[in-house]
Image: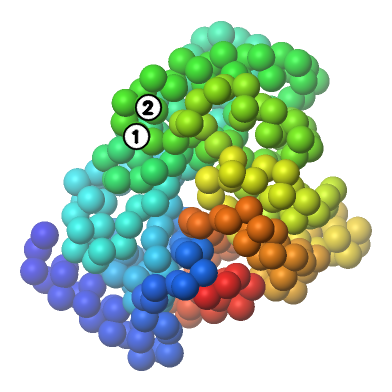
């Protein structure tokens, strides 16, 4: 680690505190807040971005895979700042989904999952976020179910060897549309190395997050945090519902936190919303603190 880069990172941290940002805190509620690395829009090195996030009060960060980052640089930034990489997002699922009808494409998707597991292990992350399948006109629901499970089982020995868990996320993929089915999907693997990455905002348009939380229970490994407005959806279209600040949509955050307390959830909550510069990131940290127990 070059001394000049480290000193610059320290200066950025001081600047963040000068803006009125919180220092990194121990969160008594055992819910730790994070952002996706791509949400940091400052023109900074990896080390400087890690230092900035720490100065703004974030407890960790999550990276995509594959990415164009040097693994050694990421690990060095983690060590220099003390900001952990808690998870990795498998970013190839839409193009090379594990439920694709073409076996060669499924093989590419599996290779991407294997790479994500390697990245997670190198960074010291505990999970790989995976969207397991996509249902469409060419891929039936039943095919998506059986194909994705078969491919994921091929990755389980490696996940176990590396000590990394595969966490499935609920997205708008026309698959696993109820919490009961999601729980069944996880349980059928009969493995401690799979679980659920629950996206709170993604279910608001057709359900209530607190209901999902109680059903998924111990299967929830981590949380993605975003907001959703049904009124905005009705006026402007489905995806417009996400364009509302945290705490100002239709997610009942007190009910969500009560449900999380009931299942004894302890872990990460990662914002998955538009990022920005240090001022924007500071606002995101403040809003997370306002909706989750601190």
Mark 1 is surrounded, within 10 Å at the Cα level, by few (under 14), some (14 to 19) or many (20 or more) other residues, namely some
Residue at horizontal 44%, vertical 35%?
A: 165
Counting from the top left corner in percent of width and height, residue 157 is at 39, 20
Q: Is residue 217 left or right of residue 139?
A: left
The answer to whether the residues at label 2 and label 1 have Cβ atoms under 8 Å apart is: yes
Counting from the top left corner in percent of width and height, residue 286 is at 54, 79
Q: Quadrant of residue 134?
A: top right
Please name the residue that numbered disc 2 is placed on: 160
Counting from the top left corner in percent of width and height, residue 232 is at 84, 64
Q: Which image quarter holds the N terminus?
A: bottom left
**SS label for mark 1:** loop
**SS label for mark 2:** helix
Q: Depth check: 67 or 122 in front? A: 122
Q: Compared with residue 150, is residue 82 higher up or lower down, i.e. above or below?
A: below
The furthest residue to the right: 234
Q: Compared with residue 98, is residue 78 higher up or lower down, i.e. above or below?
A: below
**Residue 163, label in figure:** 1
Asked if residue 226 can be seen in this view, the reply is no
Q: Compared with residue 34, is residue 89 higher up or lower down, i.e. above or below?
A: above
């Amino acid at each position: 680690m070059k001394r000049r880069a480290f000193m610059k990172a320290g200066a950025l941290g001081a600047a963040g505190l000068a803006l009125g940002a919180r220092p990194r805190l121990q969160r008594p509620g055992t819910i730790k807040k994070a952002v996706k690395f791509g949400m940091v829009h400052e023109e900074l090195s990896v080390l400087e971005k890690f230092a900035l996030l720490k100065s703004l009060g974030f407890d960790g960060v999550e990276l995509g895979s594959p990415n164009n980052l040097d693994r050694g640089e990421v690990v060095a930034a983690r060590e220099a700042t003390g900001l952990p990489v808690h998870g990795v997002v498998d970013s190839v699922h839409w193009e090379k989904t594990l439920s694709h009808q073409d076996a060669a494409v499924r093989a590419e998707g599996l290779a991407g999952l294997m790479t994500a597991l390697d990245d997670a292990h190198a960074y010291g992350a505990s999970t790989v976020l995976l969207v397991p399948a996509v249902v469409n006109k060419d891929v039936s629901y039943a095919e998506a179910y059986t194909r994705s499970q078969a491919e994921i089982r091929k990755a389980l020995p490696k996940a176990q060897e590396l000590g990394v868990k595969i966490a499935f996320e609920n997205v708008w993929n026309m698959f696993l549309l109820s919490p009961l089915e999601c729980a069944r999907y996880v349980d059928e693997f009969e493995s401690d190395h799979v679980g659920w990455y629950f996206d709170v905002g993604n279910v608001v348009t057709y359900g209530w997050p607190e209901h999902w939380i109680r059903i998924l229970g111990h299967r929830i490994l981590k949380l993605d945090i975003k907001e959703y407005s049904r009124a905005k959806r009705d006026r402007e279209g489905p995806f417009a519902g996400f364009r509302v600040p945290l705490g100002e949509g239709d997610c009942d955050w007190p009910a969500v936190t009560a449900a999380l307390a009931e299942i004894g959830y302890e872990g990460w909550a990662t914002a998955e919303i538009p990022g920005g510069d240090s001022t924007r990131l500071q606002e995101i940290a403040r809003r997370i603190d306002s909706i989750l127990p601190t």
